[in-house]
């Protein structure tokens, strides 16, 4: 055993990268759930984003276009969920699960001609000045741009929910859709927009895997990341600021576990892998403030 | 259970007779059961390449069919049996977890030939086959020991099973032979295929000083991580992964099932198929050593190719004594070579490796 | 402007028409997809929907349909109680796993004893294991108000890690040459869950599923508990006035669904699957949620929906191996079928009104 082999600076730096895809997917789902909708199709939207992003990026040679397409692909798929649950009033749990099934199949078909191809390079971005700060620089300011895009989205969502009128409406719709409706808010429109945003973010998270982390297209490559994103939203008790913490915890447990193993510590891998989920349950139990949005998962139909 | 199975076999056999008769004039049907999608770029992908090679070799004389992403267990048995029902003459089941379902199907369909990869149960109409990947690991270790400057070699292992442990031991022994100071850092990923996790594992190993990464998982994510880090060497696994050559990928182990699949299909066509237990290596090409690139010193490349050729020619066995177990006890005496039985159930590290095999 | 208006009573016609319409729509859109993939749409669709039932080898596929449908139906029946009462257990997959583990562990602890008592003991242990795993979110909901959807979902991942640990550790077969996975329980007479009548596919899990359907039907239509479940779902307030204890309702629903999921896992591990392996679970717990909804939470509906899902699985395999259809296309088709079912189902509870504006 040789714990000194673990460099804490590098550990924290790789943690930021490991957390990015799940953070992106989770922040989208957070907005969806704050609007009172439970979309369990995150995995399906992520993998659809992964494949559309990869296809677009390899075709055009531009990773940025890849990310844009991934967001569109994820949003487009989420629109299916939106139409079914908001206009055809289908059950959200069942529709979400169907969306995952559909997305996994769709992505595999779309990606058939793209196996074994390399993605265009997406270099790290050494932030000027900040990147040169000792310790902090390598941890925080020497990553690829999507790491910062992810954090900016979280920051944006936080500000949106806290300070804007539209954010207030979204929260109102999520807490009590009947009351929001009575106040004249467009419950359905708000929710469709939230669902689209969630799909776009999940798409970005998936594309981060296929364009930066792996970077290649392989069937089923999200390997459950979408479900982890759902857990993170709960862990964060639907608060964007805690979501960052949650993403780092979930990403961190994997990274830490691997680091301990490499350093020769005999770690009980299964127990460590369970721990973030158990922590999420603990959070659900302990934080009384961690109450779910009041209308979460319920069907809204404007009775007259 | 047994008697009901017999009864079913009787029913099936009666209908089979008609099925078999109907397709005597048609092409030989060869079926494949895959555990993953053909698009995994690794294990299943290479088996499917073997299937395509069979199609190419025999043209219209052979028709191939496959089912992908078959879960191990009940679904596997059904997938195998339905393939047999639909008139397959030869069925390859390409995952260890298909062992019991294949055995059960073989019992029900005595006229169909079965071939199970990486298992250990045979029957009159059931053969087994696997590859001596450890021979390729020896070549990798030989290269790794010489090109590492930090003397730290990272190893991404999948599950703690004999095949993987064998690979670690083979690689370590040959790395140590050329570089007594070499140290192996091993991460058990508990997956055969999870690109994100493999990327994390590779990054972790690199951060802890490894400048050569060996992997027993199937995605190219570690290759990409090494490329991003720069100055880190890797080896392709399952597939050649040549898109990462000449650097970071400096060589590879390729699962090349095509020759075997062609040979066995030919045997069925000729009516000479017999139960066999094949464990082939570099000699028959089942274990392919991908091109060793010029990114490594010429003398290392030359000696690695020599080692490869000696193993292939049967002049050298990668597990030749003296070799001690990790606890210092003697496993193989001077000049003694390991028997297959011990290799197949290997559950110990050789001397010099640190850490313990997880339980 | 087209608007939806809630029907006072679910439409009887649409209850039967909706699934048919969905299947037809799926066939049409799926057919276009298959044509785009270069396959003959008619032969693909007949391979999926016709072959398993009436094709040349139907004698083989029909029993397999039962084997595939049984766990789905068993789990979905359990879930339907909770879903009716507004208790959302979506962690049946975890309860299925834990039921299989506890059942198998009890059996393996007694290996290699030869007695008829072992299998019943394992059945009890499996049901208890699933029940206990389901009670965790139940109790946390009642005591701490923790959301059961999320807790039960989290516990699925915990159970998945647990089964991997078991397959590699305590339950690993000593004769397995170091490979992960337990002994084959279906090959040990004391623990085997065999085919009860040759060639029918009927094993104890199928029997249990049918009993569950009948039991659920009687409970929902005749028993006071069924009444309370329905009342809680329709109006929690009214239920409280009627003396229904909401906490007890949550525990009852989680317990029933957990126990049935555990049973499904036990029957699977002793029968068709045979072994505890690293990836023992294949998603029955999640698919059962879909089955429960497709069956409109009605026992008979669930029976039919389970059969339909099984049909797409088995027919999908036939289409793969006979026609070279990619596995992904089958997944896509299943997703599509569910979408259409969920979409047309709106007609059961709502009717279209044309011409008036809606405020929303």
Image (tube, rainbow, N blue to C red):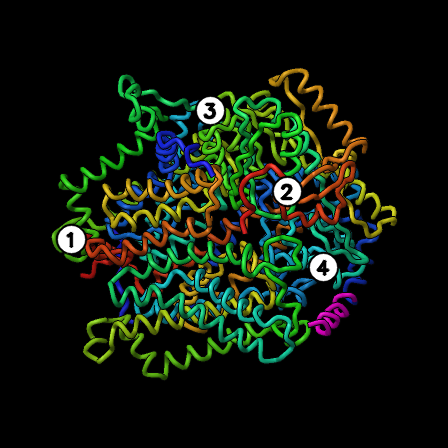
Q: Is residue C130 magenta?
A: no
Depth-wise, is mark 2 or mark 4 nearer the camera? 2
In this rendering, is residue C212 above or below A257? below
Letter of the chain that mark 3 sits on in the rendering: B
| Residue at 56% across, 43% down | B158
Bounds of the magenta span?
B1-13
Q: Quadrant of residue A152?
A: top left
Element type at marker 4? Answer: helix
What is the quadrant of residue B278 in the picture?
Answer: top right
Q: Is residue A69 above or below residue A131?
A: below
Real-space CA distance between mark 4 and mark 1, rounded to the nearest whole angstrom: 62 Å
Q: Of callouts 3 and 2, which one flags the residue occurring earlier in the amino acid sequence? A: 3
Q: What residue is disc 1 on?
A: A180
Q: Is residue A278 left or right of residue C231?
A: right
Rendering coords of residue C33 (x, y %) = 53, 45
Q: Position of residue A84 (x, y in %)?
A: 35, 52
Give me the chain letter of mark 1.
A
How far separated are the C-alphas under marks 2 and 4?
Answer: 40 Å
Q: Nearer the viewer, mark 3 or mark 2?
A: 2
Who comes first in sequence, dot 4 or dot 3?
4
Which residue is identified by label 3?
B229
Horizontal side of C315 relative to A101 (left or right) equals: right
Q: Nearer the viewer, residue A184 or A122?
A: A122
Q: Which residue is mark 2?
A: B328
Q: Distance from label 3 to label 2 (Cα)?
A: 37 Å
Q: Is residue B303 in view from this perspective? A: yes
Secondary structure, mark 2, is loop
Q: Tag 4 or tag 2, which sits nearer the N-term?
A: 4
**Marks 1 and 2, how far apart in space?**
74 Å
Identify the residue shown where x is 28% and y is 40%: A244
Circle 1 crowding by C-alpha within 10 Å: few under 14, some 14–19, many from 20:
some
Q: Which residue is mark 4?
A: B103
């Amino acid at each position: 055993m040789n714990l000194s082999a673990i460099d804490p600076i590098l550990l924290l730096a790789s943690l930021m990268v490991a957390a990015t895809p799940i953070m992106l997917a989770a922040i989208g789902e957070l907005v969806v759930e704050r609007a009172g909708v439970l979309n369990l199709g995150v995995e399906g939207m992520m993998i659809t984003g992964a494949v559309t992003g990869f296809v677009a990026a390899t075709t055009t040679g531009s990773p940025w276009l890849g990310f844009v397409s991934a967001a569109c692909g994820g949003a487009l798929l989420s629109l299916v969920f939106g139409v079914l649950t908001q206009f055809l009033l289908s059950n959200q749990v069942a529709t979400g699960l169907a969306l995952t099934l559909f997305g996994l199949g769709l992505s595999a078909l779309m990606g058939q001609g793209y196996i074994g191809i390399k993605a265009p390079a997406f270099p790290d971005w050494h932030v000027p000045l900040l990147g040169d700060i000792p310790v902090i620089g390598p941890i925080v300011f020497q990553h690829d741009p999507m790491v910062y895009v992810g954090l900016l989205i979280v920051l944006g969502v936080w500000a949106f929910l806290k300070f804007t009128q539209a954010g207030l409406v979204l929260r109102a719709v999520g807490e009590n859709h009947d009351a929001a409706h009575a106040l004249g808010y467009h419950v359905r429109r708000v929710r469709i927009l939230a669902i689209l945003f969630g799909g776009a973010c999940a798409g970005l998270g998936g594309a981060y895997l296929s364009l930066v982390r792996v970077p290649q297209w392989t069937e089923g490559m999200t390997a459950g990341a979408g479900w982890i994103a759902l857990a993170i939203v709960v862990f964060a008790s639907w608060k964007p600021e805690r979501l960052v913490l949650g993403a780092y915890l979930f990403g961190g447990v994997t990274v830490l576990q691997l680091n301990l193993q490499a350093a020769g510590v005999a770690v009980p891998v299964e127990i460590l892998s369970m721990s973030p989920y158990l922590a999420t349950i603990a959070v659900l139990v302990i934080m009384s403030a961690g109450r779910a949005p009041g209308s979460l998962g319920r069907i809204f139909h404007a009775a007259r | 259970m047994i008697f009901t199975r017999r009864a079913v076999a009787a029913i099936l056999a009666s209908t089979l007779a008609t099925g078999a008769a109907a397709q005597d004039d048609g092409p030989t049907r060869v079926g494949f059961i895959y555990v993953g999608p053909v698009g995994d770029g690794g294990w299943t992908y290479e088996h499917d390449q073997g299937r395509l090679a069979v199609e190419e070799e025999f043209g219209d004389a052979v028709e191939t069919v496959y089912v992908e992403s078959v879960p191990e267990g009940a679904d596997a048995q059904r997938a195998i049996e339905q393939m047999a029902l639909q008139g397959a003459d030869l069925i390859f089941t390409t995952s260890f977890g298909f062992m019991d379902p294949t055995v059960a199907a073989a019992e029900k369909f005595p006229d169909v030939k079965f071939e199970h990869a990486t298992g250990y149960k045979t029957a009159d109409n059931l053969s087994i086959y696997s590859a001596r990947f450890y021979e390729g690991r020896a070549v990798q270790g030989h290269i790794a020991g010489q090109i590492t400057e930090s003397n730290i070699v990272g190893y991404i292992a999948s599950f703690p099973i004999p095949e993987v442990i064998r690979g670690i031991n083979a690689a370590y022994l040959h790395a140590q032979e050329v570089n007594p100071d070499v140290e192996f850092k091993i991460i058990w990923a508990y997956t055969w295929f999870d690109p994100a996790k493999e990327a994390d594992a590779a990054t972790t190993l690199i951060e802890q000083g490894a400048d050569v990464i060996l992997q027993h998982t199937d995605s190219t994510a570690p290759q990409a991580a090494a490329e991003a880090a720069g100055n880190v060497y890797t080896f392709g696994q399952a597939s050649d992964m040549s898109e990462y050559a000449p650097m970071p990928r400096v060589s590879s182990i390729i699962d090349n099932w095509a020759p075997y699949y062609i040979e066995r299909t030919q045997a069925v066509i000729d009516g000479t198929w017999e139960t066999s237990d094949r464990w082939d290596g570099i000699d028959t090409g089942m274990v392919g050593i991908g091109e060793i690139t010029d990114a490594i010193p010429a003398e290392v490349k030359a000696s690695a190719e020599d080692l490869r050729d000696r193993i292939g020619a049967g002049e050298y066995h990668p597990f030749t004594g003296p070799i001690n177990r990790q606890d210092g006890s003697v496993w193989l005496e001077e000049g003694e070579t390991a028997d297959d039985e011990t290799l197949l159930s290997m559950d110990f590290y050789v001397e010099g490796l640190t850490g313990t095999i997880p339980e | 402007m087209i608007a939806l208006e809630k029907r006072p009573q679910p439409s009887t016609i649409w209850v039967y028409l909706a699934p048919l319409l969905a299947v037809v729509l799926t066939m049409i859109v799926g057919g276009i997809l298959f044509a785009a993939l270069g396959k003959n749409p008619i032969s693909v669709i007949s391979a999926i929907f016709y072959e398993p039932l009436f094709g040349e080898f139907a004698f083989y596929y029909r029993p397999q349909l039962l084997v595939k449908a049984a766990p789905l139906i068993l789990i979905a029946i359990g879930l339907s109680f909770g879903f009716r009462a507004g208790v959302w257990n979506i962690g049946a997959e975890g309860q299925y796993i834990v039921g299989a583990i506890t059942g198998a562990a009890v059996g393996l602890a007694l290996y290699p004893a030869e007695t008829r008592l072992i299998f019943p003991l394992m059945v009890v242990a499996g049901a208890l294991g699933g029940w206990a795993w389901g009670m965790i979110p139940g109790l946390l909901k009642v005591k701490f108000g923790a959301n059961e959807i999320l807790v039960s979902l989290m516990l699925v991942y915990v159970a998945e890690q647990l089964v991997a640990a078991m397959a590699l550790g305590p339950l690993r077969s000593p004769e397995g040459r170091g490979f992960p996975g337990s002994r084959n329980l279906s090959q040990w007479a004391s623990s085997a869950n065999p085919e009860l009548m040759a060639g029918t596919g009927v094993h104890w899990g199928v029997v249990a599923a049918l009993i569950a359907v009948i039991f659920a039907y009687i409970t929902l239509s005749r028993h006071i508990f069924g009444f309370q479940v329905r009342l809680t779902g329709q109006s929690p307030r009214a239920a409280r006035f009627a003396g229904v204890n909401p906490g007890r309702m949550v525990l009852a629903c989680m317990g029933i669904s957990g126990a049935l999921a555990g049973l499904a896992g036990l029957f699977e591990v002793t029968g068709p699957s045979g072994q505890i392996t690293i990836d023992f679970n294949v998603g029955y717990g999640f698919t059962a949620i879909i089955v429960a909804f497709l069956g409109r939470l009605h026992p008979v509906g669930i029976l039919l929906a389970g059969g339909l899902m099984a049909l797409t699985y088995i027919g999908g395999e036939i289409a793969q191996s006979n026609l070279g259809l990619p596995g992904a296309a089958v997944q896509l088709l299943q997703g599509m079928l569910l979408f259409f079912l969920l979409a047309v189902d709106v007609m059961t509870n709502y009717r279209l009104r044309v011409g008036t504006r809606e405020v929303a």
